Image (spheres, rainbow, N blue to C red):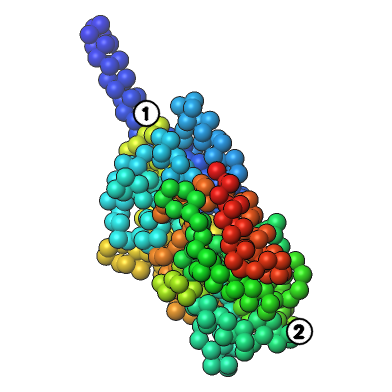
Amino acid sequence: MSINSKLLTGTALALLLSGLAANADTIRFWTTEEQPERLAKQEEMAAAFTAESGTEVEVIPVTEKDLATRATAAFAAGDLPDVIYTPLVNVLPWAEAGILDGEAANEVMEGLGNDTFAPGGLEMVAYEGGVAAVPVDGWTQMIVYRKDKFEEAGLEPPTTYAAVVAALGKLHNPPEMYGFVAPTKVDESFMSQVLEHVFLANGVSPVGDGGFAELDEAKTTEVLDFYKALVEASPKGELFWKQSREMYFAGQAAMIIWSPFILDELAGLRDSAPPTINDDPTSPELASLTGIVTTFAGPSNPDGAAWGDTRYFGITNDADTEAAIDFVKYSMDQGYTQTLSIAPEGKFPIRKGTAEDPEKFTMAWSKLDVGVDRKAPLSELYAPEMISEIVGGLDVAQRWGVKEGQLALASKMINSQVFNRLVREYVDGERDAAATVATLNEELAKIQ
């Protein structure tokens, strides 16, 4: 063999090897869904993507409380992963810091179709004329209520402050039945979530475009009076999520506010949290008697609001951009049902369908099994109108500070527990509404 032939053979071999390497690219995917069963489902979905694309995906679990710190350190080191599954709170700060590639996210959205997504999830991460990251899933807080008791009393569903108060008047009959179980334990984040939902419902927020915004006295007084009515129709004591679920499950509460993670428990699918309304802890009876409301309205905000927790795929500025875009598209299309199957009771489809089949993913999601000790699809447990209500909350889901670009400041205000403490003091009669609003404004103004 001539030297030229040997060189040619070597060149051909190098080209072949480089081609194989190109087809065997690896991207890194950080996920906060680190429980073993959830991680396994993500790895299965990633493997299906690899089989189709030739691109390997390294699925790396990251504890949610460490995510922001790790991302900042990786950014400084030039060693970010390609894609990060992240809660809402990180998205806009990361976009502004240069961690996320908004152009890549918008390319994904253009390929999938913006109008196939719930608008609330897009509005929360609006950035420079597009979005900073791709909405994946979410859940909305719910008023869970005894639909049978409402119908027997001729009551309207609890979609407004007024409807809730009317129901308290007719259904509160302790100790057999309490009208509500409102959180009053000030050091619990559960109270913070419920209060933010109640304030949002009446259109009241502590932040504006420039940062802190004084609370309107009249609108805030409406919120305070409403919450006081909830507490007065609740059992005595320091109440949080545990008591609200226990009382409702025992048939002793007409209404509570809870996350959708209660949906499988209501149907008797989780032994650690059984309904006790009858003698059978596996019975779906309570689920059949239950209605839900995701969006409700105060007198100063007739359109109402839903409190939403949404999650996103962020493509980073260190990414193999083309491969990362392909992976996110796959995860939100061919692999989307599997993405939602990680925990269907808390992962509502923020992409409802495709242009050709607008309800494709909503219908597929409703048929996914939920539960721990027993399994059943939501569509067998709840009526179609309830499924629509569950998913529909994402259309108008809100959080303080998102629209104003002040989510970080709003989060500090919530975490300070100023609202919890002062609302509880108002309910306990320590000061009147006007003084409570003034004190709230004084203390919130100090938070930077």
Q: Are marks 2 and 1 in contact (CB under 8 Å)?
A: no
Q: Quadrant of residue 82?
A: top left
Q: Is residue 98 above or below residue 372?
A: above
Q: Nearer the viewer, mark 2 or mark 1?
A: 2
Q: Residue at x 30, y 67 (%)?
A: 357
The residue carrying mark 1 is: 21
Rendering coords of residue 304 (x, y %): 45, 71
Foreground residue, 353 or 2? Answer: 353
> What secondary structure is marked by label 2?
loop
Q: Identify the image quadrant of the N terminus.
A: top left
The residue carrying mark 2 is: 175
Rendering coords of residue 242 (x, y %): 71, 66
Q: Is residue 362 visible?
A: yes
Three-letter amino acid code at the position of disc 1: Ala
Question: Total of numbered circles in the picture?
Answer: 2
Rendering coords of residue 96 (x, y %): 41, 39
Three-letter amino acid code at the position of disc 2: Pro
Q: Which mark is residue 365?
A: none
Q: Residue furthest top?
A: 3
In the picture provided, is 243 more to the left or to the right than 217?
right
